[in-house]
Amino acid sequence: MKRMPIWAGNAITITGTILGVVLSIYTPYLQFPARPLSALTAFLTLWFFPHTLTHYITGTMLGIRFRYYFIGRSSIRKIGGFFSMIAGRLPVLGIRVEVESLRRARPVSRLIMFSSGAIASSLLPYIPSTILYSADKLWGTPLLALATLNLAFTMYFSPKVGDIRRGLDSLRM
């Protein structure tokens, strides 16, 4: 596990999120093949980077402190099978919570902080997907389908092994 200071993790996640928003805005003005590639890149950046950033923002607003960002493996690897094989190889950006501040936080605050990442990475990919769809139905339709699969995947697996599970578990702290 590779650690990085909070300021560096925030800089990376903010930059990646801004990149996703900018690509989303400019996607309709591009032509093939740049248009679908731009939208797909925006989709991936808005799926990946805001996840830990929303943990940090919501947690900070709710009195939860963090120690550092890290590059590690996804909790999806706990599912087993095909998903475990893929998730075990892909790096993810995580953020380490300061345990004492987490214990002092209200249970609903812990639930909100943990769930915020799953919510962000489920909903934000709809931004480039709907923008691309409005400009180009041929390429927008598969990206909207991918966004919907992402949402369904997260709604099914996150309560089992992901952030929503951690949030629900934290209600019993």
Image (tube, helix red, strand yellow):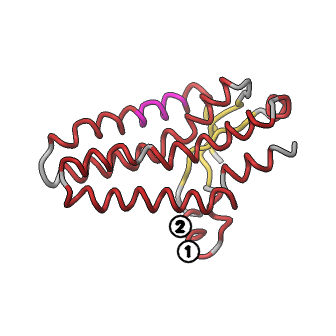
Q: Position of residue 16 (x, y in %)?
A: 42, 37
For the C terminus, the quadrant is top right
Q: Position of residue 162 (x, y in %)?
A: 66, 55
> Residue 65's quadrant in the figure?
top right
Tag 2: residue type?
A: Ile
What residue is pinned by disc 2? 86
Q: Residue at x 38, y 32 (%)?
A: 18
Rendered view: 17 above or below 155: above
Mark-to-mark CA distance, 2 and 1 = 6 Å
Q: Residue at x 46, y 30 (%)?
A: 14
Residue 131 located within the stretch drawn in magenta: no
Where residue 82 is drawn, which disc sits there? 1
The kind of secondary structure element at disc 1 is: helix
Q: Residue at x 50, y 47 (%)?
A: 121
Q: Which residues are magenta?
A: 10-17
Q: Nearer the viewer, residue 41 or 139?
A: 139
Q: Position of residue 34 (x, y in %)?
A: 18, 49
Tag 1: residue type?
A: Phe
Q: Are marks 2 and 1 in contact (CB under 8 Å)?
A: yes
Q: Position of residue 154 (x, y in %)?
A: 56, 57
Q: Residues within 10 Å of mark 1 (few under 14, many from 20)?
A: few
Q: Residue at x 47, y 58 (%)?
A: 150
Q: Residue at the right extreme?
A: 173
**In the displayed structure image, the side of residue 168 where residue 17 appears, left or right:** left
Q: Nearer the viewer, residue 87 or 128?
A: 128
Magenta region's main secondary structure?
A: helix
> Residue 83's quadrant in the figure?
bottom right
**In the displayed structure image, the side of residue 164 where residue 103 appears, left or right:** right
